[in-house]
Amino acid sequence: MSEQVVTRFAPSPTGYLHVGGARTAIFDWLWAKHNGGKFILRIEDTDQKRNTPTATQQLLEDLRWLGIDWDEGPQVGGTNGPYLQSQRRDIYDKFVKKLLDEQKAYYCFDTSEQLQTMREHAEAQKKGFAYSRPENFPDTEDVEKARRQGRPVTVRFAMPQDKSIVVEDVVRGRVEFAAGEIGDFIIQKSDGFPTYNFACVIDDELMRITHVIRGQEHLMNTPTQQALQDALGFRRPIYAHMSVTISQGGGKLSKRERPQALRKIIEVALATPNGADKTIDLEKLAGTGNISRKELDDFLSGQSVPDMPSIDAMAKYLGTALPEINVVDFRRSGYLPETMVNFLALLGWNPGGSQEVMSIGELISSFDLSRLTKSNSLFDRDKLLAFNTEHIKMLEMDILVRRFRDYIKAVDSPLAKADDKMLEKIIKANQGARTLAQMEQKSRFLFLADDRIVYDDKTVKKILMKHDGMSILQVVRHRLAEMNELTEEKIEKMLRSLAEEKQVKFDKVAQPLRVALCGTAVSLPIFNSVQMLGKKSTLARIDITLKKFAAVTEAERR
């Protein structure tokens, strides 16, 4: 390939980075890396109504976390900047003027109400809406008059109607759009900003993009973009439209899944016999999400959707887990960036052979556009979890410690107090863990104050209140107090010896101790738990447990 490969990822900052967008970035990045080319990050922020203040920063952070580095773009710079489209308006204006001067575009002054009437008229006639091009294009005097009258001024591209448009796509092959199928479309909005189709054509040309790799939904944008390229005398990049990713519940994987799941949870709670007032405090729920009560009501009625931070905050307030859908969701659920890149790369691409769990280096060397698949791909969460388990095993310990510390920081865990040596011990004690979240959940008791342990009621009743759990715990406490040194080997020997002495299974001895130390029946291996916690805290927690539940045990005896 003689020409340098140049790809781009051009997201709109309207929310967190969705895994579908992350997949697009990964494919473009892999292709550029595979060919020793250039990967450009460009922010398409021309939709001023939908852009959110924190979205661009979150998007950059998510890409960095995935390990996707860009050769040109925000925070990096380059020869083709600026890289935010909102800062490139003077560039777009020049090309709008060129099309106007060449009579390939024209001004329009229609209000939204007039356009709606046109659409309704076309619908009544059972026709698709196509804007009626004027015989004589408005001139600058007409524009000034419209502006004085307060009318919106837009610019439409005069779409050629005399020939079909053929899109040659790497994945789809030859796709033909009939002559006259696409009407004149807006290239500059009334606020002066360019539309998506126009801006991306200008940027792709000026940034010398050679390959446009994107989702299948953008295939319908391609004929209008090609028409603009022809009108402006631009090159034609190579197009590759990736297959659709389907969720396990059916339908396209959508960023709406989290809001929909939260809405359903709230609706179920409100429908309980106790009534809304006793199940959820809607005023407090709205406040938690930093939205008004009306905005919450509109969300519940399906009229609007709050920003994702509001959705996440309300879900946390309700103590419920929502399905992961954005990159940040998977990060907070304890998935590794290596796992996400590996898994997402296989959604619509087949590396050939039987190997699926691959390192980043293997993905780069294997990636080829000729192996992109037409068929839809399934976002299999069980497979993702299995991939994460394997990548945890594959990573070098120093990298895994860094990944674990990054996760701890992201979820504001008490494990932040641990040094790298302790984190390494915790990781080794968590062999077989499927996520970093599992490691954190099993280990957080080590970093809580002895009197801050929260006991799970069901576990206490099942383990401490039955089968002599409390009396066995008293014996365990006595034996531990007698030990001069708490090594894993000596702890194991003592507990197994006690189980034989009591003629009970090992769990009948170990589980009461586990509940005393962490409040649940799930933790690190019990020998590691005692050894890492230390003798002083171990004995203190046993004493607290015995005292706390002694009265309950006595009451049950009566």
Image (cartoon, rainbow, N blue to C red):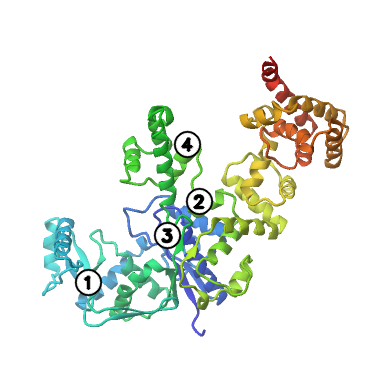
Which numbered mark, 1 or 2, is in the foreground of this view? 2
User: Circle 1 is placed at which residue position?
Assistant: 183
Look at label 4 and name its amino acid: Leu
Q: Nearer the viewer, residue 386 or 8?
A: 386
Mark 4: few/some/many CA within 10 Å (<14, 14-19, 20+): some
Considering the numbered disc 3 on the image, is that residue within a helix, a strand or a loop? loop
User: Circle 3 is placed at which residue position?
Assistant: 252
Which numbered mark, 3 or 2, is in the foreground of this view? 3
- Residue 438 vertical placement versus 359 (above, below): above
Considering the numbered disc 4 on the image, is that residue within a helix, a strand or a loop? helix
Q: Position of residue 420 (x, y in %)?
A: 71, 48
- Along the horizontal axis of the image, is 251 left or right of 365? left
Q: Position of residue 75 (x, y in %)?
A: 49, 60
Q: Quadrant of the C terminus?
A: top right
User: CB of mark 3 within 8 Å of CB of mark 2?
Assistant: no
Mark 1: few/some/many CA within 10 Å (<14, 14-19, 20+): many
Who comes first in sequence, dot 4 or dot 1? Answer: 1
User: Circle 4 is placed at which residue position?
Assistant: 318
Give the label on residue 324, or none.
Answer: 2
Q: CA distance from mark 4 to mark 1?
A: 49 Å
Residue drawn at the location 30% of the way across and 75% of the way down: 228
Who comes first in sequence, dot 3 or dot 4? Answer: 3
